[in-house]
Image (cartoon, rainbow, N blue to C red):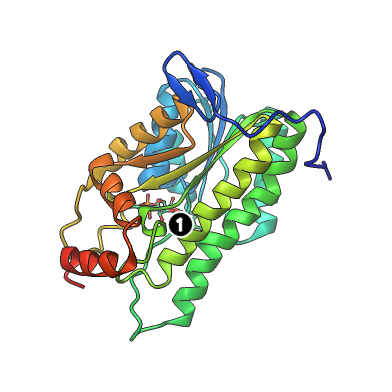
Amino acid sequence: MTSLQSPASPPVRASRTKRGWSMNPRIPDWHGKRVWVIGASTGIGAETARLLLEKGAHVAVSARREAALQTVVHGYPQALALPLDVTVPEQVRQARDRLLSEWQGVDLVLLVAGAYNEMRADGIDLAVVDHLLDLNLRAVFHCLDAVLPTLLAQGEGGIGIVSSVAGYSGLPKALAYGPTKAALINLSESLYFDLHPRGIAVYLINPGFVATPATAQNDFVMPGLISAPHAAREIVSGMETGRFHIHFPKRFTNWLRLARMLPYRLYFPLIHKVTGL
Ligand SMILES: NC(=O)c1ccc[n+]([C@@H]2O[C@H](COP(=O)([O-])OP(=O)(O)OC[C@H]3O[C@@H](n4cnc5c(N)ncnc54)[C@H](OP(=O)(O)O)[C@@H]3O)[C@@H](O)[C@H]2O)c1
């Protein structure tokens, strides 16, 4: 176990560069970077893996569906497909061992796996609640437990956690999903205190609506909807410029960030008016 307390630790502080403030080191070039994307068989994770492969990174992709993972890495000899169920800690550790035996280290781990189910107070379904807590929250700890010792021993690298704008503040229909994503925002902030001084980047990634299999079920007009390749470009450019909080599309996410700062007596009527819920 590596201690987080070190008298030589640099302070938790953003650094100023010629192009503004940077909370994480910039990534000017992906060539040779070893990236593990967990939750990469479809949607945001698959498109982010594809983009990083195009940019020359060595990418390992994980999810349950091996055939879909093989499609993502097809044509890239530097890529690895590591199927796993992220809710099973042993499978995450086994995949980590395989990755380290191939690469001897890892530069970035992106935790993307997750699911959305709508839920309201008159329809609490404990099986769905357990599933979302297991996949969206507990599984993130499985991954942290598996990779943080390696990152801390390396003293460099990064970890990105995909949360959601639904974690900013309570929203209708997000009774189970919202709390899991709020927890990930809090978790990413806590991680920054521990990992930034140890040379490890932390990225909190909050997408708005992205067209993926997860949102295909939505029966309402999704404001600010973007494509999964667009989301991947936002994530990758956010990491390249060293951001901590990577959120997009800004026209939607900034509106929600402002709304959450309102007093509750204004916040609730505003969200009710906008959503009709
Ligand atoms: N789409 C949006 O509008 C939106 C907005 C905000 C945040 N997000 C977040 O973005 C992330 C990706 O969502 P998406 O929209 O791209 O959805 P998606 O296309 O359904 O992708 C979900 C990914 O998670 C993987 N996964 C699910 N259960 C798993 C398990 N038990 N073990 C390993 N992998 C598992 C899936 O692969 P397998 O099924 O093959 O296992 C798939 O690769 C999620 O965390 C979601 O909450 C999405």
Does the closest atom of ligand 1 sit within 8 Å of the Cβ of label 1?
yes
User: For mark 1, what is the residue?
Assistant: 114
Residue 34: x %, y % from top left: 58, 28
Residue 69: x %, y % from top left: 46, 43
Q: Residue furthest top?
A: 18
**The C terminus lies in quadrant:** bottom left
Q: Nearer the viewer, residue 61 or 1?
A: 1
Position of 95 with respect to 9 (left or right) is left
Residue 232: x %, y % from top left: 36, 36
Q: Secondary structure at mark 1?
A: loop
Position of 195 with respect to 173 (left or right) is right
Position of 91 with respect to 259 (left or right) is right
Q: Nearer the viewer, residue 53 or 163?
A: 163
Which residue is pictured at 52% across the width and 60% down the height?
Answer: 183
For the residue marked with disc 1, what is the amino acid?
Answer: Gly
Q: Nearer the viewer, residue 33 or 164?
A: 164
| 99 shown above or below 133 | above
| 17 shown above or below 156 | above
Q: Nearer the viewer, residue 4 or 153?
A: 4
Q: Is residue 86 visible?
A: no
Which residue is pictured at 46% across the width and 59% down the height?
Answer: 181
Residue 261: x %, y % from top left: 35, 55
| 64 shown above or below 69 | below
Which picture quadrant has residue 11?
top right
Which picture quadrant has residue 75?
top left
**The N terminus lies in quadrant:** top right
| 74 shown above or below 161 | above
